Image (cartoon, rainbow, N blue to C red):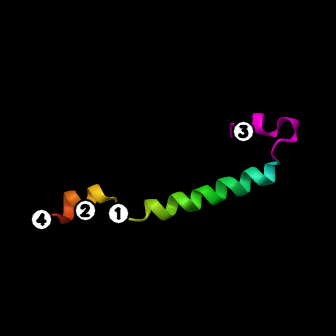
Amino acid sequence: ADHEFLLKGDVFTADFLEMWVSHKRKEADALRLRPHPYEFFLYYDV
């Protein structure tokens, strides 16, 4: 991954970055698993 610059100078730890990415992926999944309003327009607005 391209995060070596965040580890320099002990700004962030590798464990923290892994936790952060995991958290953000869960947030993205919550949105990705739901229909977008445009999908309603395309498919359900009959």
C-alpha distance separating marks 3 and 4: 47 Å
Residue 10 appears at what percent x and percent y? 87, 41
10 drawn magenta: yes
User: What label does residue 46 carry, if any?
Assistant: 4
In the picture of the structure, the residue carrying the numbered disc 3 is 3
C-alpha distance separating marks 1 and 2: 7 Å
Give the residue displayed 87% in from the left and 36% down from the top.
Answer: 9
Look at the numbered discs 1 and 2 and tell me whether their residues touch, using CB distance below 8 Å: yes
**Would you place residue 1 above or below residue 14 in this image?**
above
Pointer 2: residues within 10 angstroms few (<14), some, or many (20+)?
few
15 drawn magenta: no
Residue extending furthest toward the left: 46
Marks 4 and 1, the one that precedes in the sequence: 1
In the picture of the structure, the residue carrying the numbered disc 2 is 40
C-alpha distance separating marks 4 and 2: 9 Å
Which amino acid is tagged 2? Phe
Residue 14 appears at what percent x and percent y? 80, 49
Q: SS class of the residue under badge 2?
A: helix
Q: Quadrant of residue 1?
A: top right
Is residue 40 rendered to the left or right of residue 36? left
Look at the numbered discs 3 and 2 and tell me whether their residues touch, using CB distance below 8 Å: no
Span of residues in magenta: 1-12
